[in-house]
Image (cartoon, rainbow, N blue to C red):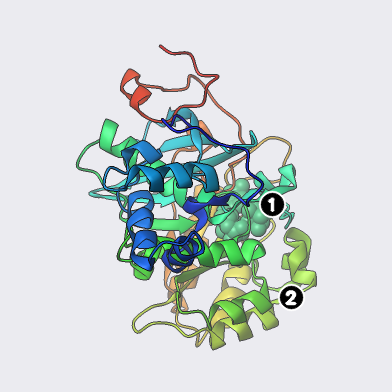
Amino acid sequence: MVTGFTVSTTTAAVRDLRAMTLAEAEAFAQELGWPRFRGEQIWRWVHAKLVRTWDEMTNLPREVRQTLAERATLGQLTIAEVQESRDGTRKLRLLTRDGKSIETVLIPDGDKTTQCISSQVGCAVDCQFCATAKMGLVRNLDAGEIVDQVYLARRLLAEVDPGRRISNLVYMGMGEPLHNYDELVRSLRILGDDKGVGLSMRRITVSTSGMVPRLHRLGKEDVRPNLAVSLNAPNDEIRDQIMPINRKWNIAALLEALRAYPLEQRRRITFEYVLLADVNDSLEHAGQLARLLRGIKCKVNLIPWNPHPEAPYQRPAPHVIDAFQNECKRRGLPTYLRTPRGDDIDAACGQLANRSNGQPVVPLRLRKLPMAPELPAD
Ligand code: SAH
Ligand code: SF4
């Protein structure tokens, strides 16, 4: 990071301001011998004004900035690559400070833009149909690395598509968010704070493969996002095969946790159901699914499987998908078909595995953004 201050090598712990909630930043300011308001002032620079250097924090006295340069970091990601799909979807490959690659996807839909963010590098859950699973779990992201995906996307849009704002956020990129529970909740507190970017929890959805004890815990938090649950099978026999997590927490345990989850008024749980040819796509399966979910306030997103190398699956034929959806509807289960977005650049659901397809798009204008050093200057 470029800063006008000398960074000394004192032994005092260096803390990352990007990974702190407002309350944590206020406590940190007090630890440094400053009043609480100083913590809020600094926090707003990082999480509302989205600055990336101490120098930009112009209303802070020079000594304060000097101390910050010694005792804190603004841990941040850099942009390694931006790819743009035929349908306008953009995939950003971002680098952490220890050189790990993660991905986030911006999906335009009319006036709205949904951002899909990652919560881990890779994933430990090992769902058989998912490209991220093939990476295994490399490490958790910290809250700073989670929220910085949103901040960088905002800055990117301001540069390349002014007027477009991120309206919805989904934790559906790489990783299992509930496996990284503390940093997930911390990131929700940061993003939901009105003194920062102030995203409403109604516009945030956390998607999980079903870590049941943590669903119970999330239901008791003061920040409570919408829930999406990757169900993907109408019975334990199939779910055991394609999602090994089901052998630990089966469908009955999962549904019990979801029934207990305190939903805000007029909210529903979203179930994701990846359609795999000849595995979970028959009319009988549709019937089982409708019976299973009866009485739960929910909707189902049907996601025709997105291909990736070396996976032993096929996407069902269009008429099979239609028939499945019609059968669900006939039985009163609200069902939506998700058309793949960004699949030409491997940005669709389940395709995130740090691959790049075709030419990376790096508009010259982006040079104002924090780009990873290995990128050519032009
Ligand atoms: N780990 C979380 C969130 C990330 S996965 C979870 O599993 O919910 C996001 C969604 O992509 C999940 O619903 C998953 O079922 C789906 N998915 C994974 N691989 C896919 C693929 N190849 N094609 C379509 N959807 C896929
Ligand atoms: Fe992990 Fe979700 Fe992929 Fe399963 S579907 S391996 S939980 S990212």
The vertical placement of 103 against 174, above or below, is above
Give whichever of 191, 354 is nearer the camera: 191
Residue type beneath disc 2: Trp
The residue at 40%/22% (across/down) is 362
Mark 1, residue position: 123
Q: Judge the density around disc 1: few (<14), some (14-19), many (≥20) Cα neighbours within 10 Å.
A: many
Residue behind label 1 places its C-beta within 8 angstroms of ligand 2: yes
Spot the residue most to the left: 163
x, y percent for residue 74: 48, 44
Residue at image location 74% in from the left, 73% down from the top? 236
Instruction: Give the secondary structure at mark 2.
Output: loop
Q: CA distance from mark 2 to mark 1?
A: 18 Å
In the displayed structure, 27 sits above or below 81; it is below
Q: Dot 1 lies on which element?
A: loop
Where is mark 2, residue-wise?
Answer: 249
On the rendered image, what quadrant is the C terminus found in?
Answer: top left
Q: Position of residue 15 (x, y in %)?
A: 56, 52
Query: Which is more toward the observer, 223 or 65?
Result: 65
Q: Earlier in the sequence, mark 2 or mark 1?
A: 1
Q: Position of residue 156 (x, y in %)?
A: 34, 36
The reply to whether callout 2 and callout 1 are in contact (CB within 8 Å) is no
Q: Which x, y percent locates residue 29?
A: 45, 61
Residue at left 51%, top 79%?
Answer: 221
